[in-house]
Image (cartoon, coloured by chain):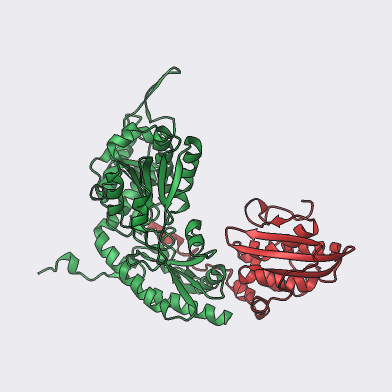
Chain colours: A green, B red
Amino acid sequence: MNAPSEKVAFDVARIRQDFPILDLKVNGKPLVFLDNAASSQMPARVMDRWVRYQSSQHANIHRAVHYLSETATAEYEAARRKLQAFINAREEREVIFTSGTTESINLVAHGWGRKFLKAGDEIILTTLEHHSNIVPWQMVAEVTGAKIRVAPIFDNGELDLAAYEKLFNSRTQIACFTQVSNALGTINPVKEMVAIARKHGVVTLVDGAQAAPHLKVNVQALDCDFYAFSGHKLCGPTGIGVLYGKAALLEAMNPFKGGGDMILSVTFEKTTYAPIPAKFEAGTPPIAAAITLGAAVDYLSEIGMARIAAHETNLLDYATAEVSRLPGLRVIGTAEKKAAVLSFAIQGVHPHDVGTLLNEDGVAIRTGHHCAQPVMQRFKVPATCRASFAFYNTLAEVDALVASIQRVQKVFG
Amino acid sequence: MRWWRRYSECRKSLGSAMADSRNLYQEVILDHNRKPRNWGVLADATHKSEGLNPLCGDHIYLSLKLAGSNIEAVRFEGESCAICKASASMMTTLVKGKSQQDAEQMVNEFRDMATGKLDTSKEPHHLGRLTVFAGVRDLPTRVKCAILPWHTLHAALHSLTTTSTEADADPLQTPVIGT
């Protein structure tokens, strides 16, 4: 009798064989890739999808009547349905292909914000936001005269939910917050955060860039108005991402970019926009990238997001326990619920020196402010070291990280 | 054979910077990082400047006392990585007592060495033991750390209050002399 698939042990060695890049040696050492929060690696099968598209299916979409154009259009729209299923959107037209999280948020800031925000209106953000969920709102605030209010966090990196709720008033129009902090790994209680906003009649945008690779996303259960994420953190290619939006909001919004494919008719007197999602996909979209992202989410779904999350939690718990034993090492971000990110500082050693020395051992981590300077200011550090895990990382790689940190401490001792 | 296996050859020897970065964290650099020389602020400074790389967080303050065109005293303090701090510390020991002109020559030579334009093992230079920083040329993200103190020295000598080696002031793009 076959065991149910949930009971099958997570075979990380088998999974690693899917990723050509993981058997690289860097500086003579096996690559230990722990910079997955910045971008994750791609399985060969997903690369193959790109090659198959370019080899046998490529033409421009939504235009010509010939075979290749029809095939490319069908594959592009099939990818949209895969992404719809991946995040459990109600309708496929609620999935807009963008270049990534940053463009998704900019699309809402400009397409929704510039149309609906007025002077004196308020936008709620949190201290945990990445620059891409801060700067677009500052740009829109400058144009519209709206004000930005920021929900604080506690010393452990958890959001102060009560303080967040107190920010809401009759002037609040939109609340934009990350589901998972890229700098600290904190998992925000987004369902409660959306519910609070909804109680006040406020629109919500969830930045899912760091959440989508690690947690099962269900936009209908969250009930958020917008959800943004990137393809390249999901084992997909760069240059592709998604904005999910509720159909009614997307329909009410202004388009962000003008051009071909987003119109119904054009005269020099008047242009009529196409219905969603085409209204937001002006010009030739990244067709190959969208189709390849479809293959990437198929790959992830076959493994299962729950099993991915469980393995990553094991890695994070083990890594946290191991580095916490090292003297002079401080873990930054100790929220109860965290996803796959271990940010730390080593006493007396600047993060950039740590990064350079770890690289000598083939260990790739991110050092710097992680494009989240308000988080750095909150913890009074210029930068941190960040190890971020993916489902293809192993406990042995955590050991390699710890051994390399110990070498850094010896060099600087 | 899977098509991507074609790339297995060029995937064999990666990270040629290894030897150099191992050379970079030599004892002399680690020692200057641990015990920076000429640390602090000159009470009677005639020239001061602040060097700040906001992206990586390197931040140093430099104060100079010039007698005529002679650098009579120099001190620095701040918060930075080991490469930046050691570069600043060694710089202060070497420019003290030098003329402004000689110091500027070292600024140029140091920048050229760090950006790979001056091979100190083959060409004449006035950098002395600062050649321990030559390996930084193979670590593009760290070049700006090593050069920041030297840009700050140049800025102080020209009575500029702040400088940076990031963004518009990228040391790979911007010549120091003539600014």
Q: Position of residue A113 (x, y in %)?
A: 41, 37
Is residue B161 shown left or right of residue A361?
right
Q: Residue at x 29, y 63 (%)?
A: A308
Q: Residue furthest top?
A: A269
Q: Quadrant of residue A181?
A: bottom left
Q: Quadrant of residue A413?
A: bottom right
For the residue pair B34 and A285, the one nearer the viewer reads as: B34
Residue B79 x/y as whole percent: 62, 68
Count of labels in the image: 0
Residue in the picture at 34% in, 73% down: A317
Q: Quadrant of the N terminus of chain B?
A: bottom left
Q: Is residue A230 left or right of residue B68?
A: left
Return the residue nearer the eye: A236 or A385.
A385
- Residue at position x 57%, y 58% from top? B55
- The percent coordinates of residue A280 (x first, y second) are 38, 35
Q: Say if residue B147 shows up in the picture.
A: no
The x, y position of residue B122, in whole percent, is 77, 69
Q: In the rendered image, which quarter is residue A110 located in? A: top left
